[in-house]
Image: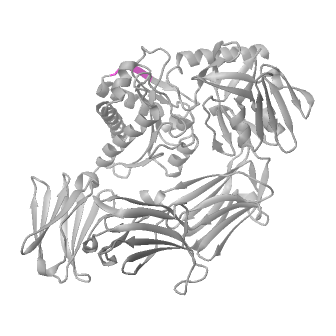
């Protein structure tokens, strides 16, 4: 048996050097580590780590370490142990790490297969010792995962398909799921037999013609609700149809290597949420109430504005107190530590915010966030315009006339402009097809407008400006190409309505196709980096994705980004987003790295184990476009079955490598806007060509 294992490891090592050597990837299929004692370098298999269902990223990766044909998963001791609530200390002289929990003291010595647990000598499994290992210049004490975790009362399992070790709390059962309300807050309670972890994901399906859903995965937990038909159908469901909660569903999502129960809450409209384990109630509690996340002074439409950012569409009351403007956000909680912002510009002295104790104007159980704008002398609340825009309350200072003109983006291809008039009067409209400019002339006696410039840039309207002379206001609307319009009067409000349609998008054969764009790495995971300019992969990947998104949207595709800023998104969460939104394709964007700095070119990785997803064909088409558009060396398409992001997805999926940051010339190119724009263009043409082959 030992000989067979050794042969398999040799094969694995051979494959990794011939097929998997390109790139310092998220999953790190093979990594090069340095022994901190002997200084010897060796290549070992990287391991993904899930703790409580959440991806764990460390600067020195978890690895599969082999001694005499026997392997164990080694993990960085400090990061992992502290996540489990224990404490750790290091004795440099003895080269020993000591782990202390409530009832255990574990001592491990570097390069020793013997440990001590509460003073008792214990042999480590497979004689694989703790090691001091380095990766990319970082050195960490690495310890056998299963041994340490099980000593601390947790459970370990192994997902061989993606080389993933899982660490979970001891197995529990879900005994009840209920819904209730307290005041303006709704709750879903998931009762368990003991403490459990959870990992949740909010899917904005309403943006793509479906409905929003909150998906909560509970690892190492079975679904065992008494007096239900779960044992027969495998599904528990309850219809709510109240306060934005449509229904609650629960089923066993995974059976092996440990059970994972998935609870899905279907929402009739977007809702903000908080998910946590409540020891008092003995289970997971899901709380639905709006939360005020941030208040800031910024530019909106090119104008100074106060923006109150909430987690769902806000319901507001405004109170004019002369030298103060009060904005109450109803059914909301304050989720920022800032209580006062000093401004002292644009007629505004300061902004104050607090959780407001309901007065006689509200019910005693109401949750209200009050935001107060203190105005400078001479400034009146009459000159302030307050509006709600998606999840924001936007307060325009010194721009009360904005309440007479309103532009609204209805969908990807449609927008509408409303101009409020004092009477139902016909306005004169001119359209300059050469300049793509629409000019509306409004007699001054029928409207109260003000000179203003509003920047849009939304694939329909570039900007809107208002100018005036002695007799007329002139509303100038600058449009993109292939925009048509129609106008009519809304007699009930005495408003001129202008509706715009982007015909290129409305008539696109790609309309309705949803592409998930996944910018690799992010946040605490920088990915690869160059050696000269020190370009970080996470930064250029995100920039390239933004460029690709714009090209796709202009062609009529729908898009969703797994990350929109410098945040870390877990490996399993990325495909979960794509699957939950029922996307048509998944493209993960990366930049490559190789120890040989002469290596350059482009490459596409795919999972060939599932022929029904057409991954290989998608990869081949994408690679052809990358090579031709970028005029780059062809590194081919490569079958990578263990990459989580392209294995766990349920639609055609590829991972693109857009150049080598380890090559000085390619790093210099990648650092330029021009190269990243061409990289986006190449992927765009590849995506189009793939769907053209299917239409």
Give the residue drawn at x 55%, y 46%: 576
Drawn side of residue 313 relative to residue 348, left or right: right
Q: What colour scheme has been applied to the protein in the rendered image?
A: one colour
**Do we see residue 664 in this rendering?**
yes
- Of 116 and 485, which appears nearest the observer? 116
Classify 344 as above or below 528. Answer: below
Labels in figure, total: 0
Location of residue 591 in the rendering, given as x and y in whole percent from the top left corner: 44, 29
Quadrant for the N terminus in the image = top right
- Of 414 and 534, which appears nearest the observer? 534
Residue at the far bottom in the pictured view: 360
- Of 542 and 524, which appears nearest the observer? 524
Give the residue drawn at x 40%, y 25%: 533
Location of residue 80 in the rendering, given as x and y in whole percent from the top left corner: 71, 37
Residue at the far right in the pictured view: 120
Q: Is residue 634 magenta?
A: yes
What span is colored magenta in the figure?
632-636
- Secondary structure mostly taken by the magenta-highlighted segment of the chain: strand
Q: Quadrant of residue 213?
A: bottom right
Drawn side of residue 8 relative to residue 323, left or right: right
Location of residue 476 in the rendering, given as x and y in whole percent from the top left corner: 15, 63
């Amino acid at each position: 048996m030992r000989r067979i294992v050794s042969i398999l490891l040799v094969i694995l090592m051979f494959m990794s050097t011939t097929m998997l050597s390109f790139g310092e990837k998220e999953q790190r299929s093979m990594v090069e580590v340095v022994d901190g004692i002997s200084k010897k370098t060796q290549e070992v298999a990287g391991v993904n780590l899930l703790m409580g269902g959440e991806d764990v990223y460390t600067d020195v990766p978890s690895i599969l370490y082999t001694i005499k044909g026997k392997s164990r998963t080694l993990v960085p001791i400090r990061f992992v142990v502290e996540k489990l609530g224990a404490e750790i200390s290091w004795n440099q002289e003895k080269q020993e790490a000591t782990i202390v929990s409530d009832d255990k003291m574990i001592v491990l010595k570097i390069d020793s297969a013997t440990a001590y647990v509460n003073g008792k000598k214990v042999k480590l499994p497979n004689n694989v010792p703790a090691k001091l290992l380095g990766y990319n210049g970082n050195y960490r004490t690495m310890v056998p995962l299963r041994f340490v975790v099980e000593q601390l009362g947790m459970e370990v399992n192994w997902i061989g398909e993606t080389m993933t070790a899982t660490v979970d709390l001891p197995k529990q059962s879900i005994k009840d799921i209920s819904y209730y309300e307290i005041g303006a807050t709704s709750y879903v309670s998931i009762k368990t037999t003991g403490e459990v972890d959870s990992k949740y994901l909010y899917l904005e399906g309403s943006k793509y013609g479906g409905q929003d859903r909150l998906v909560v995965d509970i690892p190492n937990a079975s679904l065992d609700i008494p007096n239900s038909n779960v044992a027969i159908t495998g599904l528990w469901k309850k219809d709510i149809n109240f306060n934005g909660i449509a229904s609650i569903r629960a089923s066993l999502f995974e059976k092996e290597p440990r059970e994972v129960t998935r609870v899905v809450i279907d929402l009739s409209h977007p809702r903000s949420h908080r998910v946590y384990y409540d020891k008092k109630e003995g289970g997971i509690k899901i709380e639905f109430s709006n939360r005020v996340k941030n208040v800031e002074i910024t530019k909106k439409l090119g104008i100074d504005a106060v923006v109150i950012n909430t987690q769902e569409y806000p319901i507001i009351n405004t109170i004019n107190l002369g030298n103060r403007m009060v904005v109450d956000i109803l059914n909301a909680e304050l989720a920022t530590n800032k209580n006062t912002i000093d401004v002292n510009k644009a007629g505004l002295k300061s902004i104050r915010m607090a959780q407001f104790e309901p007065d006689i104007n509200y019910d005693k159980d109401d949750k209200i966030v009050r935001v107060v704008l203190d105005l400078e002398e001479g400034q009146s609340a009459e000159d302030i315009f307050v509006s709600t825009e998606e999840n924001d309350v936007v307060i325009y200072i010194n721009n009360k006339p904005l309440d007479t003109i309103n532009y609204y983006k209805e969908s990807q291809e449609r927008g509408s402009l409303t101009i409020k008039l004092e009477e139902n009067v016909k306005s004169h409209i001119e359209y300059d097809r050469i300049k793509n400019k629409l000019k509306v002339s409004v007699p001054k006696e029928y409207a109260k407008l003000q000179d203003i410039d509003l920047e849009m840039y939304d694939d329909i309207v570039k900007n809107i400006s208002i100018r005036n002379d002695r007799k007329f206001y002139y509303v100038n609307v600058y449009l993109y190409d292939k925009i048509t319009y129609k106008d009519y009067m809304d007699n009930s409000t005495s408003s001129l309505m202008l509706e715009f349609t982007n015909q290129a998008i409305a008539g696109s054969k790609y309309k309705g196709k949803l592409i998930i764009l996944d910018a690799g790495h992010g946040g605490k995971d920088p990915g690869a980096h160059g050696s000269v300019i020190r370009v970080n992969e996470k930064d250029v990947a995100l920039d390239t994705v933004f460029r690709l998104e714009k090209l796709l949207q202009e062609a009529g595709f729908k898009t969703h980004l797994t990350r929109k800023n410098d945040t870390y998104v877990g490996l399993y969460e990325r495909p979960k987003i794509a699957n939950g939104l029922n996307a048509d394709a998944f493209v993960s964007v990366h930049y490559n790295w190789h120890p040989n700095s002469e290596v350059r070119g482009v490459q596409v990785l795919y999972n060939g184990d599932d022929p029904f997803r057409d991954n290989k064909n998608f990869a081949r088409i994408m690679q052809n476009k990358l090579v031709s558009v970028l005029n780059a060396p062809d590194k081919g398409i490569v079958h990578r079955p263990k990459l989580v992001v392209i294995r766990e997805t349920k639609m055609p999926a590829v991972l693109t490598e857009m150049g080598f940051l380890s090559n000085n010339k390619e790093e210099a190119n990648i650092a330029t806007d021009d190269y990243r724009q061409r990289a986006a263009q190449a992927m765009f043409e590849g995506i189009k060509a793939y769907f053209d082959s299917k239409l």
